[in-house]
Image: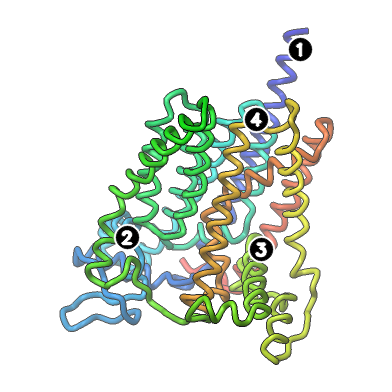
């Protein structure tokens, strides 16, 4: 009986490993197809990123914030991406040097690096969940399926973009937040988590989403202490170590910006919808409509790079148009609302697992981890909304490009939600069905994007 049970367990483990490997293979296929199909410099901001890399590699200095492709009187490179922190571009400089500055090969090397970074991010997100849920290979495998078949994620992976390093660092942060929650001595992984946040803030501001998992991990550990005072002291110590490490690693960059530019983060564009909180409050219907429109664009962009594909007009845009006295007709509302269906289904599954106090539900550590993921999503959504309202209204046109930093984590949460709703005897069949549907859909969207870009360009 023991041998038979062990053999059955091995077969189940092998099945879930195969599901995960097929998902990863599909990601690699799609990412490489997109990397070959997108014209050189044809992805969003690629020429500007290349100019930044060239400034670091060829001149050993930061570029100026000005129009793309220009050079100032002192021969300094000018690019709108000069607003970005420098870490990604420093790491890309050796690729530029090895390619002797040839744009064709710099793009090839940069896109290959993006594919590898985004693959490592998925593997780290898997490892984070496995660390906390070693007895749930089904959740890990199905989470991998979702993470690998988000079209926006695959698209960013096939481009030269500092987003790839941001994605990798956020996934690394998720892994170390899991390590903090299971460690007997959590201070060291908490310090590493702070360093990861610091490196993220030297890459892209979207990595600030790690604040959610850091706070959740610190509080999760502190809650094990006896007494309110001891809990408060433990939380203060852990969070102080994490945020102190982040400040040491990244603080100098923002101090430098303050001294050179007069503010912590310089901006290439300033095109706000509102100039103060009072303007926002004065028109509550319009403000709510604009925020809903932006959130809806983010929702749809999870499964497709909508800034490229010109999707139908969403309901919230119709609402916004009516608020300002304009006109817009609702076009194919099902296509607009379709992404909401799987998110609501798996979201209910996560809530159900969260509330279940039996062995089938989430443990305390697992709740803190997935709570940190939710907090990260709130930070990201809030940041994007604030950027659109008070910094650059054009963000609405490409809001989905800010999502990939959290998509590996979202995929893992969706895996948990789906498996929580599925009876054990059906889990393998459901996993195969989800794998087939998501991979086929991902390939279909990829084919559309490739045709739109005009085929192979290398």
Task: Tell me how far mark 1 sits from mark 4, CA to CA.
Answer: 30 Å
Task: Tell me how far mark 1 sits from mark 2, CA to CA.
Answer: 54 Å
Q: Is residue 351 left or right of residue 215?
A: right
Dot placed on the residue nearer the N-terminal end, 3 or 1: 1
Label 4, residues with CA under 10 Å away: few <14, some 14-19, many ≥20: some
* Residue that label 3 marks: 299
Question: Toward the viewer: 272 or 26?
Answer: 272
Question: Toward the viewer: 76 or 108?
Answer: 76
Would residue 115 be seen by someone viewing this image from the given angle? Answer: no
Q: Position of residue 355 (x, y in %)?
A: 74, 38
* Residue that label 4 marks: 363
Q: Is residue 56 left or right of residue 154?
A: left
Label 3, residues with CA under 10 Å away: few <14, some 14-19, many ≥20: many
Q: Secondary structure at mark 1?
A: helix
* Residue that label 1 marks: 4
In the rendered view, how is the structure colored? rainbow
Dot placed on the residue nearer the N-terminal end, 3 or 2: 2
Would residue 165 be seen by someone viewing this image from the given angle? Answer: yes
Residue at 43% over, 48% down:
169
* Residue that label 2 marks: 89
Q: Nearer the viewer, mark 4 or mark 2?
A: 4
Tally of marks:
4
Q: Secondary structure at mark 4?
A: loop
């Amino acid at each position: 009986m023991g041998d038979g049970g062990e053999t059955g367990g091995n077969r189940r483990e092998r099945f879930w490993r195969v599901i995960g490997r097929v998902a990863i293979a599909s990601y690699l296929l799609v990412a490489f197809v997109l990397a070959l199909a997108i014209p050189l410099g044809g992805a969003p901001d690629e020429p500007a990123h290349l100019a930044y890399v060239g400034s670091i590699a060829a001149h050993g200095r930061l570029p100026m914030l000005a129009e793309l492709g220009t050079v100032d009187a002192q021969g300094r490179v000018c690019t709108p991406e000069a607003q970005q922190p420098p870490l990604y571009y420093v790491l890309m400089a050796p690729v530029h040097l090895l390619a002797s500055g040839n744009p064709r090969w710099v793009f090839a090397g940069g896109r290959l690096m993006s594919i590898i970074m985004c693959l490592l991010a998925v593997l780290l997100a898997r490892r984070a969940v496995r660390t906390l849920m070693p007895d749930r290979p089904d959740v890990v495998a199905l989470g991998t399926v979702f993470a690998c078949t988000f079209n926006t994620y695959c698209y960013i992976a096939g481009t030269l973009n500092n987003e790839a390093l941001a994605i990798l660092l956020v996934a690394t942060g998720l892994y170390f937040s899991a390590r903090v929650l299971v460690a007997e001595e959590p201070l060291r992984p908490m310090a590493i988590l702070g360093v990861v946040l610091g490196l993220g803030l030297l890459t892209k501001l979207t990595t600030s989403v790690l604040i959610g998992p850091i706070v959740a991990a610190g509080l999760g550990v502190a809650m094990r202490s006896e007494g309110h005072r001891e809990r408060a002291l433990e939380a203060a110590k852990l969070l102080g170590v994490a945020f102190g490490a982040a400040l040491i690693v990244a603080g100098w960059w923002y101090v430098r910006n303050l001294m050179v530019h007069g503010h912590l983060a310089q901006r290439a564009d300033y095109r706000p919808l509102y100039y103060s909180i009072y303007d926002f409050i004065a028109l509550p219907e319009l403000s709510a409509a604009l925020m809903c429109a932006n959130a809806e664009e983010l929702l749809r962009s999870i499964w497709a790079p909508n800034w490229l594909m010109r999707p139908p007009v969403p309901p919230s845009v119709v609402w916004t148009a009516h608020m300002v006295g304009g006109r817009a007709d609702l076009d194919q509302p099902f296509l607009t609302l379709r992404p909401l269906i799987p998110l609501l289904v798996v979201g209910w599954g996560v809530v159900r697992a969260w509330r279940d106090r039996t062995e089938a539900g989430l443990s305390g550590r697992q709740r803190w981890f997935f709570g940190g993921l939710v907090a990260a999503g709130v930070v990201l959504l809030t940041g994007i909304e604030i950027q659109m309202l008070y910094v650059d209204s054009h963000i609405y046109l490409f809001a989905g490009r800010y999502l990939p930093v959290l998509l590996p984590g979202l995929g893992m949460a969706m895996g948990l939600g789906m498996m929580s709703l599925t009876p054990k005897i059906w889990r393998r069949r459901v996993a195969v069905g989800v794998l087939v549907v998501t991979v086929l859909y991902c390939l279909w969207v990829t084919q559309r994007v490739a045709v739109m870009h005009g085929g192979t360009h290398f």
